[in-house]
Image (cartoon, rainbow, N blue to C red):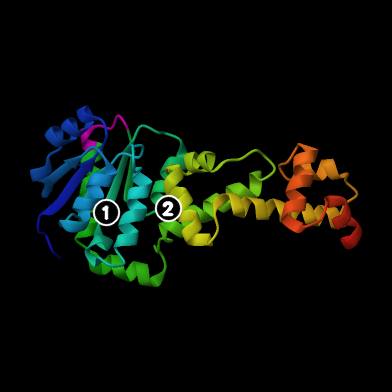
Amino acid sequence: MNVSICRAVIIDDEAWIRDGLSKHIGWERLGIELVQVFEDGMDAITYITEQPVDIVLSDIRMPNMTGLELVATIREKAKEHKQLSHIKVIFLSGFGDFKYAQEALRLGAVDYLLKPSDVEEIEEALAKAKALRESPEESVLRDESGMDKIEEPASYLIKKALGVMGARFTEDIHLSEIAEELCVTPNYLSRLFRQETGRSFSDYLSDLRMEKATELLKSSMLKIYQIGDAVGYPNPRYFSEWFQKQTGMSPGDYRKHHAI
């Protein structure tokens, strides 16, 4: 087993937390060298890509790049920079909602700690991360067996986004709301959505609503304004104009031509 010093970075947008973690954690005793401290994920990812880093202790909510986006970016860059695949991430967050912990752990975080955490708890998480980092053979075996294999962050986030859209397409839903639920920025989700689906968020949502609208027009006895409301367009005139633009015919004409 390799027992060399592990290198760690701290990422948190609050200065007092960065200072506290730097000063009060027994880094030397743990066999971990704190090599850098950042207040923003964007600056950190540049350093992590260029310098050897083994452990990342990061906040979840930060400007420019959230902690979850950071994990996804590290995993993506690991395809070209193999050394990044061994980085262990610990999240330290003020958000106690289980969904944040669930998202973090699902994306491959070693641990998720709530602020304020005591020094002992943080050191236990760091020791765990160090132990995992020093057992690469064991990690590889688990990954190949599929037991602990982690789904690609990009695919997982988009799968979650599509699930939310499927459940709430009847509402006045916006990409920014889904990004908030997934703990990522709207710009990041928009870019990722197009990358993974080949379509923009708005185009995908429009297609989803059209699929349901045509289904209801063909198979239900609902009035046209009721169908519009059922697919997220409560304004009858807007629904008819939107449908005409998408299909080249009015909802009424579509029903006549496709009635079951």
Q: Is residue 3 visible?
A: yes
Q: Is residue 216 above or below residue 38?
A: below
Disc 2 crowd, CA 10 A, few/some/many (<14, 14-19, 20+): some
User: Residue reaching furthest top?
Assistant: 16
Please say whether residue 109 is visible from this viewpoint.
no
Residue count near mark 1 (Cα–Cα under 10 Å), binned few <14, some 14–19, many ≥20: many
Tell me, yes or no, whether the two marked residues, 2 and 1, touch with CB atoms within 8 Å: no
Pick the front one: 8 or 252 = 252
Element assignment for label 1: strand
Q: Which residue is mark 1?
A: 88
Disc with the residue nearer the chain's start (2 vs 1): 1
Q: CA distance from mark 2 to mark 1?
A: 13 Å
Q: Residue 11, position in %: x, y? A: 24, 41
Q: Is residue 116 magenta?
A: yes
Q: Which percent across, then down, holds residue 146?
A: 42, 68
Residue drawn where x is 83% and y is 41% of the image: 226
Residue occupying image coordinates x 53% and y 38%: 177
Q: Residue at x 23, y 45 (%)?
A: 43
State which quarter of the image contains the C terminus: bottom right
Which quadrant is home to the N terminus?
bottom left
Q: Position of residue 152 (x, y in %)?
A: 42, 61
Give the magenta part as a residue range.
115-120
* Camera-side residue of 191 and 91: 191
Quarter holding residue 50? bottom left
What type is the residue that disc 2 sits on? Answer: Arg
Q: Which residue is more in the foreground, 14 or 187? A: 187
Would you name the residue on which mark 2 appears? 106
Horizontal and vertical percent position of residue 217: 84, 53
